[in-house]
Image (cartoon, helix red, strand yellow):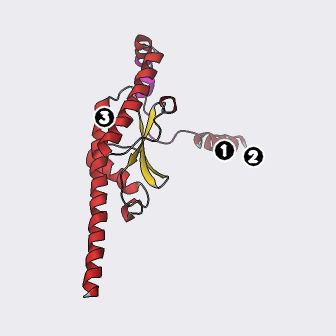
């Protein structure tokens, strides 16, 4: 193998390990400000804020939805809260995967909250970050309530349609 081939081969290998996507230097430019922010408030205050926000945010979302959080034990919460969605029919065709729910919240409200099935229910896992406040959890709770109510109406309408079909057939 000559030097050109060797150099080209090395370059191809190196290029395969480069990050995919756009190069954005904003994160590097914000390091100094981020460190100053942490120094101003202290890591323990920031961690306490995020932990309390996760607990309170999860509880307020559960109240809005009329459900519960996965755990009520504070030290098991960290900075994340898992809140159950009150979907009546877990087998609704629109939610065979979480894609419909995720796309709905992104397209209509420009928000994202991961959703998953666990123990016969749909759940959302919300993360408390320093740049969030309780009002963000309230807003998300109302958004999720809207989509859940829409799915539950469809389920009820489908059940009513099925009952009506049975009545007609028996006449």
Q: What residue is drawn where x is 40% and y is 22%? A: 49
Q: Is residue 155 left or right of residue 97?
A: left
Circle 3: is it few (<14), some (14-19), or many (20+) Cα within 10 Å? few
How far apart, in angstroms, are the residues tagged by discs 1 and 3? 50 Å
How far from the left and from the top, in percent, is residue 10? 66, 40
Q: As displayed, is residue 133 above or below residue 18?
A: above
At 29% from the left and 52% from the top, the residue drawn is 147
Give the SS element for disc 3.
helix
The mark tally for this picture is 3
Q: Secondary structure at mark 1?
A: helix
Residue behind mark 2: 1
- Closer to the camera, 171 or 18? 171
* x and y, in percent, of residue 77 in the image: 48, 33
**Which class describes the residues within 10 Å of circle 1: few (<14), some (14-19), or many (20+)?**
few
Residue 30 in sight: no
Q: Do the residues bearing badges 1 and 2 touch, measured as CB atoms within 8 Å?
A: yes
Q: Which residues are magenta?
A: 18-34
Q: Quadrant of residue 83?
A: top left
Q: Which residue is mark 3?
A: 136
Mark 1 highlights which residue?
9
Q: Is residue 143 magenta?
A: no
Residue found at the far right of this picture? 1
């Amino acid at each position: 193998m000559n030097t050109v081939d060797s150099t080209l081969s090395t370059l191809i290998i190196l290029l395969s390990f480069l990050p995919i996507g756009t190069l954005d230097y904003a994160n590097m430019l914000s390091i100094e400000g981020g460190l100053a922010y942490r120094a101003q408030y202290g890591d323990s205050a920031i961690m306490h804020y995020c932990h309390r926000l996760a607990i309170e945010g999860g509880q307020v979302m559960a109240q809005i939805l009329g459900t519960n959080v996965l755990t009520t034990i504070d030290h098991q919460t960290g900075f994340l809260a898992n809140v159950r969605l009150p979907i009546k029919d877990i087998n609704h065709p629109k939610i065979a995967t979480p894609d419909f729910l995720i796309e709905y919240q992104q397209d209509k409200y420009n928000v994202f909250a991961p959703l998953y099935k666990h123990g016969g229910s749909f759940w959302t896992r919300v993360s408390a970050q320093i740049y969030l406040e309780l009002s963000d959890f309230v807003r998300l709770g109302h958004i999720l309530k809207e989509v859940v109510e829409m799915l539950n109406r469809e389920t009820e309408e489908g059940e009513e349609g099925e009952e009506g079909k049975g009545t007609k057939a028996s006449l």
